[in-house]
Image (cartoon, rainbow, N blue to C red):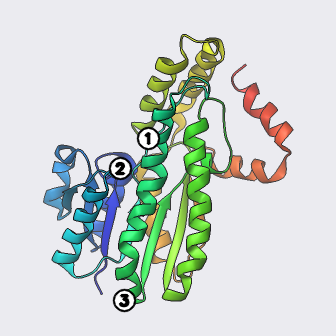
Amino acid sequence: MNKVVLITGASAGMGKETAKLLAQQGYTVYGAARRTDRMKELTPLGIKTIEMDVTGDSSMVKGVQQIIANEGKLDILINNAGFGSYGAIEDVPITDAKYQLEVNLFGAARLCQLVLPYMRQNHWGKIINISSIGGKMATPFGGWYHASKFALEGLSDSLRNEVKPFGIDVIVIEPGGVKSEWGSSAFDSLTKVSGHTAYKSMATKFANAFEATESKNAEPILIAKLIQKAIEARKPKARYAAGYMARPALFMKKLVSDRLLDKVIMSQIN
């Protein structure tokens, strides 16, 4: 049976690559983003694009209702929309911090609420929440980003057990380094927010260390294939990880003490 998929953040990076891959595999794909002009290349591939702002309730309601009106169901939700707003916790305005969580956490949560009635009705569904290795371990200057992803991990764990009796799987994807707009956006904000404060020296070193590893980041298609694997697994795992340093970093997090992990992280920027 043909499955209907909604992917948020489909205008770039992992979201766009996932939309392309799943469309090639015969899924009915809806790509959602604020910037519909950046999804024009998806239309010739049979991907249906819709404007959606995950910070606007009416926008999300309208998008889901449009898919249901067209298809009669919504089988798979991929909560991919997100960004990283970097800067020292002391420096980041709380309004910006709230917006970070609004996009990365509450938008995903609200879409889960909107699609679950249709998935329960069909006794089948997949919810894929795109977290990060930054949902398990934290670096300086990413406090609000990490807060959003740690929260998404916890939300997913609760939701997974709530909806399992209805035949619905909740799966977390934890990318490591992946080539995307995310890095430039995150570190532009770091420079803007903390580049001229008491944290200037450390922030500069952190940005330089990050920039030095960017060329090692994985291509977005790697994560797209991982998402497909998770969707199609008969008994999916709760979590899948891939991308630059994903598995080594997560293994280290399990293995070493917080104090030692702090030393390892800080050794990279001192």
In this rendering, the answer to whether 261 lies above or below 195 is: below
Neighbor class of circle 1 (other Cα within 10 Å; few <14, some 14-19, many 20+) is some
Residues at badges 2 and 3 in contact (C-beta under 8 Å)?
no
| Three-letter amino acid code at the position of disc 1 | Tyr
Residues at badges 1 and 3 in contact (C-beta under 8 Å)?
no
Q: Position of residue 243 (x, y in %)?
A: 55, 49
| Three-letter amino acid code at the position of disc 2 | Thr
Neighbor class of circle 3 (other Cα within 10 Å; few <14, some 14-19, many 20+) is some
Check disc 2 and report its element: helix, strand or loop. Answer: loop
The numbered disc on residue 99 is 1
Q: How many marks?
A: 3
Q: Which residue is mark 3?
A: 122
**How many angstroms separate mark 2 from mark 1 (CA)?**
8 Å
In this rendering, the answer to whether 266 lies above or below 81 is: above
Q: Nearer the viewer, residue 147 or 17?
A: 147
Q: Which residue does the image show at 74% across and 27% down from the upper left?
A: 266
Check disc 3 and report its element: helix, strand or loop. Answer: helix
Q: Which residue is mark 2?
A: 55
Check disc 1 and report its element: helix, strand or loop. Answer: helix
| Three-letter amino acid code at the position of disc 3 | Asn
Q: Determine if residue 238 is in view.
A: no
In front of the other: label 2 or label 3? 2
Q: Name the side, left or right, on which 60 lies relative to 117.
A: left
